[in-house]
């Protein structure tokens, strides 16, 4: 019933939503996947939604207002069921129609946008849930295949120059601007693509977390193609 993708993978696979939320992160496992092959035409839903901004939140009422084929209706029912399951669990799911995220081009030596490998952080115990219904999907990276960018000597020296303050305040400076949440993949690293249709639960960095947080990144969008992503 439960298994990992491969030896050394940080992923555990489950068969339904109840297992997804009940499974525990432990050891190297910091990503849990409800692996599934979805029926329905999600492309039709994307084609009938209106992009108002680069990231447009889509409500349940927006979905229900669409005139869809039978396959489109199947896809809509799956999305609505996922949103309801997560809401009943106590999460706050958001369905986003995405053209692109904002890029961070402030510095040429480090980026803090979601296209950079990073971990999510919270002051309270929580997890990140996500599912890509259509379009390019995110990647995760086993923790041993990455290094914190702030520990890379040349980046660290440039950040110290940028800080230009007392040494004892430097770590607080890194946390304040979220530099410490971003990672560089090691040579020969093998990112794992999260694929379409699967519902994922990723470990977040928080005070009570018992495992390393899951390192992940948003994909570069395909030309002319929007993404439909459920996230919370």
Image (spheres, rainbow, N blue to C red):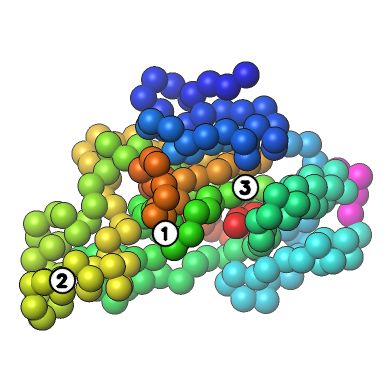
Cα gap from disc 3 to disc 2, whole angstroms: 36 Å
User: Is the Cβ of the residue at disc 1 closer than 8 Å to that at disc 3?
Assistant: no
**Figure label count:** 3
In which image quadrant can residue 95 be found? Answer: bottom right
Q: Residue furthest front?
A: 208
- Report the side of 130 relative to 203 (left or right): right
Indicate the position of residue 118 as horizontal and vertical percent values.
Answer: 37, 55
Q: Crowdedness of circle 2 by 10 Å Cα count: few (<14), some, many (20+)? A: some
The dot on residue 170 is 2
Residue beneath label 3, please?
131
Of circles 3 and 2, the one toward us is 2
- Residue in view at x 13 percent, y 63 percent: 156
- Residue in view at x 65 percent, y 70 percent: 56
Residue beneath label 1, please?
121
Indicate the position of residue 232 as horizontal and vertical percent values.
Answer: 60, 57
Indicate the position of residue 226 as horizontal and vertical percent values.
Answer: 62, 59
Magenta residue span = 68-72
Helix, strand or loop status at disc 1: loop
Helix, strand or loop status at disc 2: helix
Vertical arrangement, residue 35 with respect to residue 143, above or below = above
Nearer to me, 226 or 94: 94
User: Is the Cβ of the residue at disc 1 closer than 8 Å to that at disc 2?
Assistant: no
Cα gap from disc 1 to disc 2, whole angstroms: 19 Å
Vertical arrangement, residue 89 with respect to residue 166, above or below = above
The dot on residue 92 is none
């Amino acid at each position: 019933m439960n298994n990992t993708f491969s030896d050394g993978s940080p992923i555990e696979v489950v068969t339904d939503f109840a297992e997804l939320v009940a499974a525990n992160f432990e050891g190297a496992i910091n990503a849990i996947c409800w692996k599934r092959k979805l029926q329905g035409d999600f492309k039709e839903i994307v084609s009938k939604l209106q992009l108002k901004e680069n990231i447009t939140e889509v409500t349940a009422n927006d979905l229900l207002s669409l005139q869809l084929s039978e396959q489109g209706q199947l896809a809509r029912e799956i999305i609505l069921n996922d949103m309801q399951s997560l809401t009943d669990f106590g999460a706050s799911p958001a369905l986003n129609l995405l053209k692109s995220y904002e890029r961070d081009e402030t510095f040429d030596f480090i980026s803090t946008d979601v296209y950079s490998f990073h971990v999510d952080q919270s002051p309270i115990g929580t997890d990140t849930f996500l599912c890509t219904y259509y379009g390019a999907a995110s990647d995760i990276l086993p923790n041993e295949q990455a290094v914190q960018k702030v520990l890379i000597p040349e980046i660290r020296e440039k950040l110290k120059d940028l800080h230009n303050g007392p040494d004892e305040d430097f770590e607080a400076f890194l946390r304040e601007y979220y530099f410490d949440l971003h990672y560089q993949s090691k040579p020969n690293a093998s990112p794992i693509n999260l694929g379409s249709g699967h519902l994922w639960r990723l470990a977040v960095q928080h005070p009570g977390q018992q495992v390393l947080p899951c390192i992940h990144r948003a994909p570069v969008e395909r030309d002319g193609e929007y993404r439909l992503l459920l996230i919370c």
